[in-house]
Amino acid sequence: MRLIVIILLFTAYMSGYAQYPPAAGMPGSTAIAFDSSCFVAWASSVSITRGFINISDTTATDLGSNRASYGLDIDATGIADNLVVSLGDSGYADLYFSIPIADGAGFDFAIFENSFSDTFFELAFVEVSSDGINFYRFPAFSLTDTLAQTGSFGNTNPEQVHNLAGKYRQYYGTPFDLSDIADSPLLRKDSVTVIRIVDVIGTIDPQFAQRDYEGRIINDPFPTAFASGGFDLDAVGAIHDRSNTSMSELQSTIQVFPNPVSSVLHWTGSDEVRIFSADGQTIFVGTANENSFDFSEMVPGLYFLKASNRATATKIVVNR
């Protein structure tokens, strides 16, 4: 009995530190190969703002510059080909598409980096915008060690990071689903015109450290004081855009706010609305004249809202 308890405790401990999809080629991986038929387009233009090669020592230089300088902006456009542009510490790239990206069924786009292995990662946050002004970041999660700094050529377990670009090796894209971003009246998920990729400063030094959606420090190789320092952007491929997404898919999500919610949830006009729990139990059925529901007495967790005139349900997160 004691052995069983120890095994269960160990399993619970490990699950808290390795719970996301594994490396490319492994069962359960979400990595998408660059030559997959799911891609319908690639970024057609890009604007890049380079970061320092070492943000904790801005006097450090490589190849005559204190900012990342490897690669050309154009290397981030077109199909993934392992020609990259380096962003440097907290540098960022804005990618544009000839046809706006749309929220379809499943993943909507994928980002390619040039990692030479399944464990060496230079990570990046991902944000989207439908107007080029207001940007919304994917909720990123990191379970990486926060006590010991990952060295310049150190390793990271891919199962410890989620919704961060760069977790897969070269020629394999990290996919993103627009439905993971909370709804906002300033973001049209059926017409995303800009994808912004922001290098994660991987230091655990509180002065420069960056944190995930839940406030944890993100630890990745640092410093990378080279001309090729920071996230190395290869390409961004579109899976769903307005050319291959049907109107029923474009209209599949109803606008809800606020989300996450702690008390009253509101939604845009619709026919009958049904709200159900993660286990499929219906907790509310409303009419076309009702556009709100009070979650204050509900158990925190994941719920779904589906309108009768929409194809799919919208995820609702209830917290306190």
Image (tube, rainbow, N blue to C red):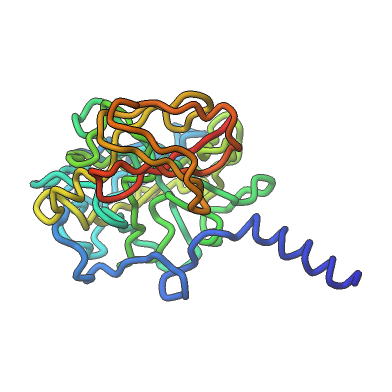
Is 30 situated above or below 235?
Answer: below
Query: Is residue 93 visible in this depiction of the protein?
Result: yes
* Residue 251 picture location, percent across and down: 20, 43
Position in image of residue 181 (x %, y %): 37, 40
Q: Quadrant of residue 36?
A: bottom left
Image point 52% across, 24% down: which residue? 263
| Residue at image point 47% right, 75% down | 27
From the viewer's perspective, is 218 left or right of 29?
right
Residue lying at the far right of the rendered structure: 2
* Residue 155 makes an appearance in the image: no
The number of discs equals 0
Task: Tell me the residue at 46%/45% (across/down).
Answer: 276
Which of the image's four quarters has the C terminus? top right
The quarter of the picture where the N terminus appears is bottom right
Q: Position of residue 250 (x, y in %)?
A: 19, 46
Between residue 31 and residue 266, name the one nearer to us: 266
